[in-house]
Image (cartoon, rainbow, N blue to C red):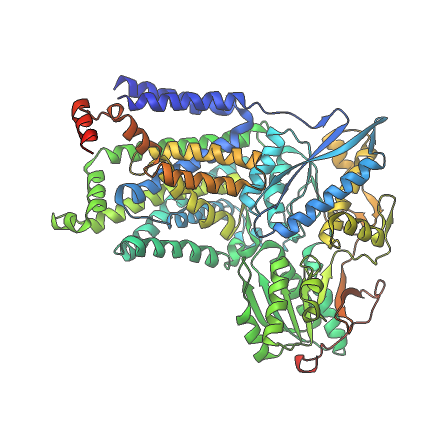
Amino acid sequence: MRLNKIILSFVSALVILFSTSVASFAKVVGDKIILGAAISLTGKYSSNGVHTQNGYNMAVDRINNMGGVKVGGKTYKFDIIYYDDESNPKRAAQLAERLISQDGVEFMLGPYSSGLTKAIAPVTEKYGVPMVEANGASRSLFTKGYKYLFAVLAPANLYLDVAIDLAVEKNNGKGVTVAMAFEQDAFSQDVRLGVLDAIKRTGSKKVIDDKLPKELNDMAATLVKVKQMKPDVLVVSGHTKGALTAIRQISEMKVDVPMLAMTHCDAAKLSKQHGKNSQYALCASQWHKTLTYKDDFFKDGMTYDADFTKEFGYAPPYQAAESSAALLVFKDAFERANSFDQKKVRDALAATNMQTFYGNIKFAPGGQNVDKPMVLFQVMCDDAGKCENKVVAPTKWASAKLIHPIPSWSKR
Amino acid sequence: MKNTSILYIGILIFGIAAPFVFPAFKVQLSILCVLIVLATTWNIQGGEMGYNSFGNILFYGLGMYLCASVQVGMFFPLAEWTESGGEKTFVHTPAQFFQGMAVGLIVAAIVPTIVAGLIGYSILGLRGHYFAICTLGLGVAAGEISGGIEIIGAGQGFTTPPFPDVGSLDSRGEFFYFLSFFTLVLTFIAVRSIYSTRFKLILNAIRDNEDKAEAMGIETMKYKIIGWMISAFFCGLAGGIMGGLVGYIDSTDVAFDGREMGVFMVLMAILGGKGTLWGPIIGATVFHIFKEGFWTFFLGWQYVALGVLIVVIVIYFPEGIMGWLREKYPERFGEVVDEKDRKAQVELK
């Protein structure tokens, strides 16, 4: 059989190909500390993936320009190897493996979204690679006993329970009726669990509990129900697409609801894209530029906001801010460990206790940041139609008073 | 025949040595094995039988969820494992992990086979586009349904048991590589042996003219179902392995990933040449290497590059690599070409 010859030569070509592609090993090369990151540059999380990448890049430039990282009397600069995980957990896990075993990366930055972080964490854990992540908030990440995972953000279940508390407070402490619509993904489902806890705690009642598909571009069915049931609060979470879809359809269908609470409003640039239609929406956020935290690199939130806008042409959503903070945490840990030994850096990370422009950072044994509360802001527009996000809760940071209930569409 | 055995032994040695020669590529090589299994089994329907199935992803995803569920459920309460707010941490001992995996893989192979039999009985009566669309729906539906079942993690996803601490860091990669390589060998032997029987001829008869085959007294339905069950068996196994390898199961992105895996398996078989034994294997290998290359060198444009590749395949190699080779070097495929006769025909044109 001559056919076998073809296959034989094909196999040998394969062998040659594999053997020539020698893995390049890079971890700390020369004066560079090379970090690895799988980021969603394409796929359903691509817009937030870009926010994450911009946040990382901004911090890398800033730290490098301001003297870099000093370890063992030498100055090092940060560099990041990026791959595109296509918003796909399977791909993300493969890329983590590739970054570590082929590119020789010894320190990782997190991807965007809880699902992808969930896929990467087992890999980094296996190799003992410390990972500081800024965009995986699902609680289940912190109950698996991971030792090398550190999240600079507050867990997802804390995102919107404040909104329920607020609604109850406005209802004179009596329970409210809550309609919920959540995307079927790790993050949004965890936000849902947080809301469920809050409902139970406050004696409220859930009247709608819908799951939305991942490629979220229609939630009309839920909104029809909301129109019928007239709940006190409508809670929606589904990343950027969820926020955009909700505002678009609520305004199209003129759905009246006293309180609308969401996530990802700033990442979706709601106030810019939908203007007055997005008015009064309450949004959970990890960070807001008006918060008064400070650090040496970005000064404070307002400065970060201005610098980021200058560099990337849009106002930084919290996804960018928390990503920048991850680099600050790494720098701090490297300098305290005074070593590139992964175990020592890991221990230094675990002992982190610092303030950044983004907030205080201190890790619980599970890896989540326990020193930074969530904030709620409300989209508020002036008569000229210019909209802004103003913090309304918690009271310590509030720069505006909550407008409640939302005026009905007929009166707007 | 001597040549063939040298080839097989060569590939076997390459397969066994690969993880040690290219230690950094273990995961890619494991995935390659899984891809080959998927393409080869898809070829039973799409290539030999002429039924373009987009539903094989159903068995792959089913196997993935089943294997992980069994592996956890044998030793710990599954509901608590997948519950996101849970405070407990469960850790498998090495013995539990491997026992769970073994039983899990058996279940992951058998249940999809039964499911294939049941579904096949009801939908294999459809033909052509109707069958393709129906199976496409199966995969999508399975993804959405599994995304709503709390006990397997629903939208939260399912973290499969972490590999236990045995020996060196490389042991996990080696374990999954050999598991997938063994599955590949098993699949190859099974497919090769059924291709040398009357069974393959029946499948081909169904492809070429199903009505005529039926008129000749062949119980086409029976053979179609058996063919699908064979595919399901190996797809389930492949899914179970892939679940452990990825470490995290998401309903639509990892398990019932019709958009990627479901399409890739078709693409790979077509690229290599459907309806041949070696086509899907070559197709999967070429595809995987191209894909990994694109993902490295055309970051951000990888899908564009992949799209161009697909267009090139469709235009220049409609019969796949094997089909192209066969046309170019027919004598190497054991076809006797009468040079004089061929020239005469060319001149006639």
- Seen in the image, is A53 located left or right of residue B119? right
Residue A65 quadrant: top right
Q: Position of residue A246 (x, y in %)?
A: 61, 67
Residue at figure coordinates x 58%, y 78% from the top left: A227
Q: Which of A144 and B50 is in front in this view?
A: B50
Q: Nearer the viewer, residue A380 or B217?
A: A380
Q: In this view, does B97 lie above or below B167?
A: below
- Which residue reaches farthest bottom? A410
Q: Where is residue B39 in the image (x, y as percent from the top left)?
A: 38, 39
Residue B102 quadrant: top left
Q: Position of residue B4 (x, y in %)?
A: 29, 21
- Seen in the image, is A114 located left or right of residue B218? right
Residue at figure coordinates x 85%, y 37% from the top left: A66
Q: Is residue B30 above or below residue B266?
A: above
Q: Is residue B267 visible?
A: yes
- Seen in the image, is B183 located left or right of residue A34? left
Image quadrant where one finds the C terminus of chain B: top left
Q: Where is residue A359 in the image (x, y as percent from the top left)?
A: 81, 51
Q: Which of A10 and A28 is in front in this view?
A: A10
